[in-house]
Amino acid sequence: MEREEEIQLILQAQGGDDHAFTQLFQCYYAFLYKYLLKLTLNEETSVDLAQETMMKCYVKLSSYKGEGKFSTWMISIASRLYIDMLRKEKREKKWVDEEKLTLSRKLAWESSTKGMNWSDLFTDFNTLDSTLRVPILLRHYYGYSYEEIGKMIGIRTGTVKSRVHTGLRKLRKELDTP
């Protein structure tokens, strides 16, 4: 798109012409999506961020001063949205990890006050990823077969066996570490 044509479309869009913004959107969406795909390495996340970016561009179009290319302004918005998403994920992960630790300590304390033996193995078990924890719990605590577990959680039997094996190997490794 020529710079003059871009400026004209931006001015029209800033004046309330939704068709002009649609033309800008169509012109720059592929560029934006490819940038986000390279950044995130995830198609779904890239689509979500591209849509959010274009929505923010639409809402904030009046703040575009025209000092640089529209694509540069758009990429700066997309980059900030991506960084914000990473920060949010990091905060959420930290919160979930803290909640798991708190729950594990609470269960250990409650079991000790009731005269039950709480092993460090269960504390280590809670640190496993849920994709490993669920099959181990269903197999070794509740006694379900690999086939039943596969049907319950929607994965193949071989995958269930692999996850149980991997999880148990990680727990053994934790126990062996002084």
Image (cartoon, rainbow, N blue to C red):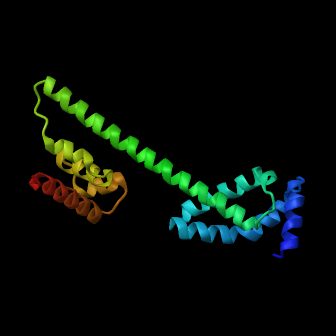
Q: Residue at x 63, y 59 (%)?
A: 78
Can see residue 142? no
Q: Residue at x 25, y 45 (%)?
A: 126
Of the 4 image quadrants, the one containing the N terminus is: bottom right
Residue 80 is situated, as x and y percent measured from the top left of the image, at 60, 56
Q: Residue at x 24, y 63 (%)?
A: 162
* Horizontal relation, residue 47 to residue 175: left or right: right
* Horizontal relation, residue 38 to residue 172: left or right: right
Residue 171 is situated, as x and y percent measured from the top left of the image, at 17, 53
Can see residue 174? yes
Up the image or down, 168 lies above or below 116; here it is below
Furthest toward the top, the residue is 113
Up the image or down, 77 lies above or below 68; here it is above
Report the number of numbered marks: 0
Residue 41 is situated, as x and y percent measured from the top left of the image, at 50, 68
Depth order, front residue of 69/10? 69
Up the image or down, 133 lies above or below 111; here it is below
Q: Residue at x 17, y 49 (%)?
A: 140
Residue 17 is situated, as x and y percent measured from the top left of the image, at 89, 56
Quarter residue 168 falls in: bottom left
Depth order, front residue of 173/4? 4
Furthest toward the bottom, the residue is 2
Quarter residue 32 falls in: bottom right
Quarter residue 119 falls in: top left
